[in-house]
Image (cartoon, rainbow, N blue to C red):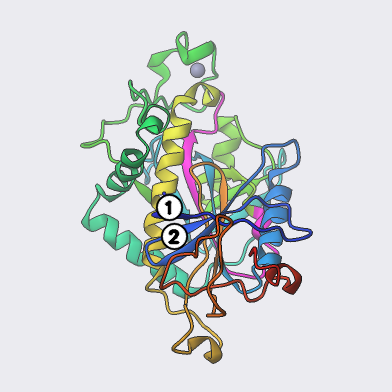
């Protein structure tokens, strides 16, 4: 999803994140994947975001991208491969943390600042005007890397099963699951994935139980359930969460694996589109950062899989050199001026 990848490498003591650097539109981007371990996802997100925040001291925004299970309701016709961007909704801040298995609301995370919400709104209008835009961004990415089409393209049969909440999974592949217990949903006029806007529920444990899923839905009016977003609660920079829908958080969920990679691609495309729109955001910056020589660049991050992103304004302090000895893109006179001086002074950046 990067428009350009920068061949940079440096080590910051105490920061175990694995960063990839690049550019989306006019904004510089840094990506860090979230590891798949037995540690609670909330802890992983908090650890990665905290390290990122510490390393990039002038971070302005963190974007968290990953998977979620849809909470079906009568208002939003959400399908596998769609995506949700967390914004305040129905009196909620946008991210509601609940306990599991009690399924009780613990707290709500702070909302993104209005400038970011305005950008989400702009993004929403943009997609309303051109519903194929997400598909175009996905195709752009896959055309750059054709070998990824098989993995991240749409599932060949596009089978998207939503069973009634009281019907439990029977057999592998849902082949023996009773199709008469499927929720009757009309087919869509097109195959473009859609982006929904509203609150998401988050916990440390994935839900594979439709009744518990629906209970959370009734309590919170959330659009989907994820794991990990609560890890952003103590991060002292604005955050935004984008979730791609990979299942319906029910007992049949593990049979929907074919959608996982495609949904990841949808989420990444939405993140890219959103980052492109971020260039119009008016940030509250220190006046000294507005000098003519300053390169007001955002650092942000996103990957096709569960990922975290960060943005940072940087000022002109000379042109860094990458590990291959070439200078980084001309015109982007950025550097990590707030990095550990001992690292910056090595010249390896
Ligand atoms: Zn099933």
Secondary element at tag 2: strand
Instruction: Classify mark 2: residues with Cα within 10 Å, few (<14), some (14-19) or many (20+).
Output: many
- Residue 2 coordinates in the image, percent (x, y): 43, 52
Viewer-closest of 125 and 24: 24
Report the residue at 68% width, 54% height from top.
48
Residue 129 position, x and y percent, is: 21, 57
Q: Quadrant of the C terminus?
A: bottom right
The x, y position of residue 279, in whole percent, is 39, 70
Residue 344 in view (yes/no): yes
What residue is pinned by disc 1? 2
**Residue sitting at 48 percent across and 79 percent down?**
283
218 versus 93 height, above or below: above
Residues at marks 1 and 2 touching, judged by CB atoms closer than 8 Å: yes
The boundaries of the magenta stretch are 230-251
Q: Nearer the viewer, residue 156 or 99?
A: 156
Would you say the beta carbon of the disc 1 residue lies within 8 angstroms of ligand 1? no
Label 1 to label 2: alpha-carbon separation: 6 Å
């Amino acid at each position: 999803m990067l428009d350009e990848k920068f061949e940079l490498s440096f080590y910051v003591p105490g920061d175990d994140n694995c960063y990839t650097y690049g550019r989306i539109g006019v904004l510089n981007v840094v990506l860090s994947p979230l590891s798949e371990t037995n540690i609670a996802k909330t802890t992983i997100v908090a650890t990665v975001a905290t390290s990122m925040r510490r390393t990039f001291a002038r971070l302005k925004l963190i974007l968290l991208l990953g998977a979620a299970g849809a909470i079906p309701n009568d208002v939003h016709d959400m399908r596998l491969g769609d995506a949700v961007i967390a914004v305040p909704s129905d009196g909620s801040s946008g991210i509601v943390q609940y306990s599991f298995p009690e399924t009780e609301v613990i707290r709500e995370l702070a909302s993104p600042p209005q400038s970011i919400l305005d950008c989400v709104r702009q993004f929403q209008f943009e997609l309303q005007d051109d519903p194929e835009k997400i598909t175009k961004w996905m195709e752009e990415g896959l055309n750059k890397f054709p070998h990824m089409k098989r993995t991240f393209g749409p599932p060949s049969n596009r089978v998207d099963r939503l069973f009634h909440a009281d019907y439990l999974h029977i057999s592998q592949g849902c082949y023996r699951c009773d199709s008469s217990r499927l929720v009757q949903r009309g087919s869509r006029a097109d195959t473009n994935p859609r982006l929904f806007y509203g609150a998401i529920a988050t916990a440390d444990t994935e839900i594979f139980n439709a009744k518990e899923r629906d209970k959370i839905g009734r309590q919170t009016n959330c659009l989907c359930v994820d794991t990990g977003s609560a890890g952003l609660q103590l991060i002292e920079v604005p955050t935004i969460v984008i979730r791609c829908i990979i299942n319906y958080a029910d007992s049949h969920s593990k049979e929907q694996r074919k959608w996982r990679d495609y949904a990841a691609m949808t989420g990444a495309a939405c993140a890219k589109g959103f980052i492109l729109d971020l260039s119009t955001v008016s940030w509250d910056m220190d006046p000294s950062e507005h000098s003519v020589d300053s390169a007001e660049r955002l650092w942000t991050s996103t990957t096709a899989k569960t990922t975290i992103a960060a943005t940072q304004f940087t000022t002109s302090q000379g042109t860094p050199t990458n590990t291959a000895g070439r200078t980084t893109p001309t015109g982007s006179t950025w550097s990590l001026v707030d990095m550990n001086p001992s690292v910056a002074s090595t010249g390896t950046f």
